[in-house]
Image (cartoon, helix red, strand yellow):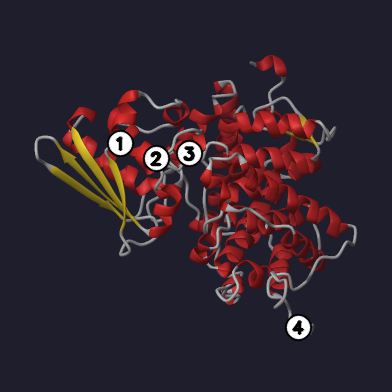
Amino acid sequence: MVARSVQSASAQLSAYVASLGLAQLPPEVVHQAKRAIIDTLGAALAGARSDEVERLVAAVRDYDRGQDAGVWGRSERMSVPEAALINGTAAHARELDDWLALVHAGAVVIPAAFALAEATACQGSRLIEAVVVGYEVAARVSEGAGLAAQYRRGWHPTGTCGAFGAAAAASKMLGLSAEVTTLALGLAGSFTGGIWAFIADGAMSKRLHPGKAAETGVIAAFLARRGFTGPRYVLEAPFGGFLSTYVPGEADLGQVTKELGHTFKILDNGYKPYACCRGVHAALDAILSLHRRHAFTAADVRAISVAVPREVQLMCGANRTETLLDAQMSLAFSLAVAVTAGDVRLEHYERLPPAPEVQGVMGRVHVNLDGSLQNEAAVVTVELHDGRRLTERVDVAKGDPTNPLSDDELFTKFERLATRVLPPATARRALERLSELEHLDSVSGFARDLSPLPHAH
């Protein structure tokens, strides 16, 4: 049993969530929060018309008749929890969303916070606060659970840890006290989930994980506001606690609250330049660099070998391309596209089945385990028919916080993705408003720009 006199980790997180204000945020944290919102909205707009979202909208409309919040890139309106569910799923539908401590935090936290921001017509500053605390909580819970440990056990941290971040963001949006926020975190932690079984057949469930976590967090906050209690020791309870159940014997509870209030996890956020699993990015950086410097063609290539850490081999070592997710999780497919097209964009992943030329290169890609490599590093070797062996190693891929996308690169990404479903002028106006988000008197008017009327296209 946990002594009730000891303040729980979730209570410490909740005190932070309830007390944080915009005035306490350094300029770089506010800037990073706006970058995260811009990036997530772009990713969601790109996924707004995906097959997964089309099916999800139809299913939700079977039981939900709410009108409180918009679905980004679409004309439908839903209740707040279901808007969070759909927008979170859309943000993850094209593998373009950000990541932090193995959590696709933007696809979970921002749909939850934004749906409430729209429904309550709050100021932009409150949305920024909610995003910051949501990222903080999601990252800390994931770090406490152990990054490698979660993968080894088959958990998808976006689903399992993301719900805590969504509950924190929703609690901030609703102005809940620290005590009530603790209950919300407890409720959210009681219903987390997300397993890697999708990797076997490319199932749509992966896309749903962040949306479901966002919905869970929103509902938890609403329940707590009405006095519905959740476990105050949800993280550390020795029997049935989140950490003891999901990663028994491998958790580090101290990571959850270490330097809480003195650091900002959102500053460690990463952004994707490519529409595929992050485990593929280092290898893509490497082969695109080789391709630019040596100008070889697909016909010149005899073989490509890529050495990666164990986790990347498990996630991305297959060469199946029956579904879009298969292609986005495949090192072989991505490297083949890079060689044949000289570039890798979302459009390349959407062209399935692969062209014969791409399939031909895929058959020459060999994925090898290198236990000495860390994180998502990769070593790519291209063997050419003329006898040359070209090798490149990338330890930190583009988009990592230590190798970041610039603001211009991030804004270009947003406009390219947003204009798939929004008129260019609307996309540019949205970007301008997001850039000045802390000064907006109400989020609701801006939100309407993201949900075009049926006649807009």
At mark 1, the secondary structure is: loop
Q: CA distance from mark 1 to mark 2?
A: 8 Å
At mark 2, the secondary structure is: loop
Q: Is residue 456 above or below residue 204?
A: above
**x 72%, y 39%: residue:** 443
Whether label 3 touches label 2, CB < 8 Å: no
Q: Type of residue at label 1?
A: Gly
Lower position in the chain sequence, tag 3 or tag 4: 4
Q: CA distance from mark 1 to mark 4?
A: 55 Å
Lower position in the chain sequence, tag 1 or tag 2: 2
Give percent across and percent down for residue 395: 32, 56
* Residue annotated with mark 1: 363
* Residue annotated with mark 2: 319
Give percent across and percent down for residue 274: 42, 39
* Residue annotated with mark 3: 326
Whether label 1 touches label 2, CB < 8 Å: yes
Q: CA distance from mark 1 to mark 3?
A: 15 Å
Nearest the camera: 214 or 379? 379
Q: Type of residue at label 2?
A: Asn
- Residues packed near mark 2 inside 10 Å, few (<14), some (14 to 19) or many (20 plus): many
Q: CA distance from mark 3 to mark 2?
A: 8 Å
Q: Which mark is residue 1?
A: 4
Whether label 2 touches label 4, CB < 8 Å: no
Q: Quadrant of residue 359?
A: top left
- Residues packed near mark 3 inside 10 Å, few (<14), some (14 to 19) or many (20 plus): many
